[in-house]
Image (cartoon, rainbow, N blue to C red):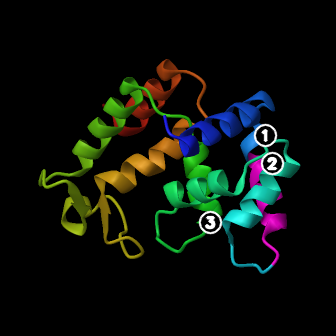
Amino acid sequence: MDAADATMEKLRAQCLSRGASGIQGLARFFRRLDQDGSRSLDAGELRQGLGKLGLALNEAEAEAVCSRWDRDGSGTLDLEEFLRALRPPMSQAREAVIAAAFSKLDRSGDGVVTVDDLRGVYSARAHPKVTRAEFQDYYSGVSASVDTDEEFVAMMSSAWHL
């Protein structure tokens, strides 16, 4: 595990120790830190914010966290990127049920859900296609709020008739 992952593990543990509101509280805190309204933090802002939460990072660690989780290449970490990094890893059972649900949608089996796959089931005006990675990412967020694998698998199985 590299330094960026270790830092996120520490922060994840700190958030989880605060209960269900830990990550939500962190989101509110980071919105306040975003002085310019850009919805993103550079390494210095991130370092300052985490320091106020009791997680001291040096400059190199803050840079590593930013670069590790900066998905859009902006050089900053937006709130969505940071919250995604904080999500605990999903178990194989959760990943398997998400894959099964995606496969049910992907009628053509090409790894992309298109309008043709969803015709009559979903209005795709805003999102004309959904990749498996996007689907997985969405349910990873849902997964973070479900306590056990059994509950998550039951929820997915019920919702998608798996």
Query: Which is nearer the N-term, disc 1 or disc 3?
Result: 1
Identified by mark 2, the residue type is: Gly
Task: Single out the residue that lies furthest toward the right.
Answer: 52
Identified by mark 3, the residue type is: Asp
Q: Which residues are magenta?
A: 24-35
Q: Using residue 26 as the reference point, say whether residue 152 is left or right of it.
A: left
Residue wearing tag 2: 25
- Where is residue 159 drawn, in percent x and y? 42, 37
Q: Is residue 146 above or below residue 113?
A: above
The CA span between labels 3 and 2 is 16 Å
| Front: mark 1 or 3 | 3
Look at the numbered disc 3 and give the secondary structure of its residue.
strand
| Quadrant containing the C terminus in the rendered view | top left
Q: Using residue 103 as the reference point, say whether residue 101 is left or right of it.
A: right
The residue under the point 27% across, 36% down is 100
Q: Is residue 24 above or below residue 112?
A: above
Contact? badges 1 and 3 (CB < 8 Å): no
Q: Is residue 116 magenta?
A: no
Query: Which is nearer the N-term, disc 3 or disc 2?
Result: 2
In the foreground, 151 or 18? 18
Q: Using residue 111 as the reference point, say whether residue 120 is left or right of it.
A: right
Identified by mark 1, the residue type is: Ser
Residue wearing tag 3: 78
The CA span between labels 2 and 1 is 6 Å
Q: Is residue 54 above or below residue 59?
A: above
Contact? badges 2 and 1 (CB < 8 Å): yes
Which numbered dot is residue 21?
A: 1
Magenta span main SS: helix
Look at the numbered disc 2 and give the secondary structure of its residue.
helix
| Front: mark 3 or 2 | 3
The residue under the point 83% across, 50% down is 51
